[in-house]
Amino acid sequence: MSDEKQVGIVLVSHSAEVAASVADLAKGLAGGGTSVPVAPAGGTEGGGLGTSSELIAAAAASVDRGAGVAVLTDLGSAVLTLKALLAEGDELPDNTRLVDAPFVEGAVAAVVTASTGADLAAVEAAAAEAYSYRKV
Amino acid sequence: MLDADFFRRWMTATAASVDREAERLTALDSPIGDADHGSNLQRGFRAVTATLEKEAPQTPGAVLTLAGRQLISTVGGASGPLYGTLLRRTGKALGDAPEVSEEQFAEALRAGVDAVMTLGGAAPGDKTMIDALVPAVDALRDGGFAAAGTAAEQGALATTPLQARKGRASYLGERSIGHQDPGATSSSLLVAALAEADGE
């Protein structure tokens, strides 16, 4: 554990349940009691399947400790909404990045890496590296 | 010259057209998508007209930028960031001039369409909204609003025999052939609304 500011992690899925479960899974696998700020942003504000820019912006603000925010997304509108928000310039905390990574494996790698006090670039690299983990 | 009122009318006419066609858009989205295109866009453009009325932006650029931002935050599907980016980039390209020429608008709309291609990674022929928008921008430059509307509609119709290469429909592979693309169809409504806004 480090006293340094930790990178925040936002998990964006079309489904509120998927986002929340993956957040729990990643925190659980990072070791109980990890202090890494992780926030799910799943589904639409009405509770349906989809993407909400408001939920994403609120989640990013809630995990921003000044060390940057890594955002992992599932697919389609989750990716496009995040990119559109990043292009907007003022909707997300400074130093927010869309991390190109598989959603579940990347989230685990990102949270574990962030729990060591690693910086945003290291968290991003660890999450992206999850693509190279072959299962067969 | 085109002023802020023209662009407000464009958005209002688009919202009315999307309202009229929402069921058809959703029906087109059923076999190759997730059957929410009509209702998503309806919610988005209703929010656009409401916010334009409330905030009353004074320049063409401000109208489109605000409309784009509203679409990104209210649609909830991929069409939100795509249409939002289209309008916002077009608006930003228009700057803060109180009036713009049709030529300036055509150029700005091309910048908006380019931004959509960059965001979504789609090219002409991928069976997306780009297949209606690119011919519309070409026709707008050469023939004005009515020609752009016709070109967009023909572009949308021409998506039917194509196989989808972007978005959810692309997972269907060859089964996406034979269906008109919902995004190209709604794009043709947006472009057709230009002539309506011009006629009032």
Image (cartoon, coloured by chain):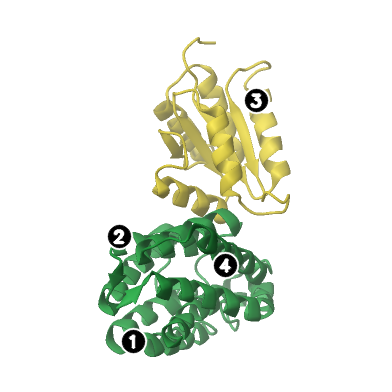
Chain colours: A yellow, B green
Query: Marks 2 and 3: same chain?
Result: no
Give residue B96's mark: 2
Query: Marks 4 and 1: same chain?
Result: yes
Q: Nearer the viewer, mark 2 or mark 3?
A: 2
Does residue B104 appear anywhere in the picture?
yes
Along the viewing direction, whichever of A69 and B55 lies nearer the viewer = B55
Say which amino acid is labelled 4. Phe
Q: Where does label 4 land, which residue?
A: B45
Query: Marks 1 and 2: same chain?
Result: yes
Q: Residues within 10 Å of mark 3 (few under 14, many from 20)?
A: many
Q: Quadrant of residue A1?
A: top right
Q: Is residue B121 left or right of residue A56?
A: left
Residue B107, horizontal then vertical, whole percent: 28, 72
Q: Residues within 10 Å of mark 2 (few under 14, many from 20)?
A: some
Q: Where does label 3 land, which residue?
A: A27
Label 3: state its secondary structure: helix
Image point 65% across, 25% down: which residue?
Answer: A27
Say which amino acid is labelled 2. Asp
Give residue B144's mark: 1
Label 1: state its secondary structure: helix
Say which amino acid is labelled 3. Lys
Residue A92, horizontal then vertical, whole percent: 47, 39
Query: Marks 3 and 4: same chain?
Result: no
Residue B10, horizontal then vertical, whole percent: 46, 75
In this view, A127 is above or below B117: above
Q: CA distance from mark 2 to mark 3?
A: 47 Å
Q: CA distance from mark 1 to mark 3?
A: 57 Å
In this view, B131 is above or below A108: below
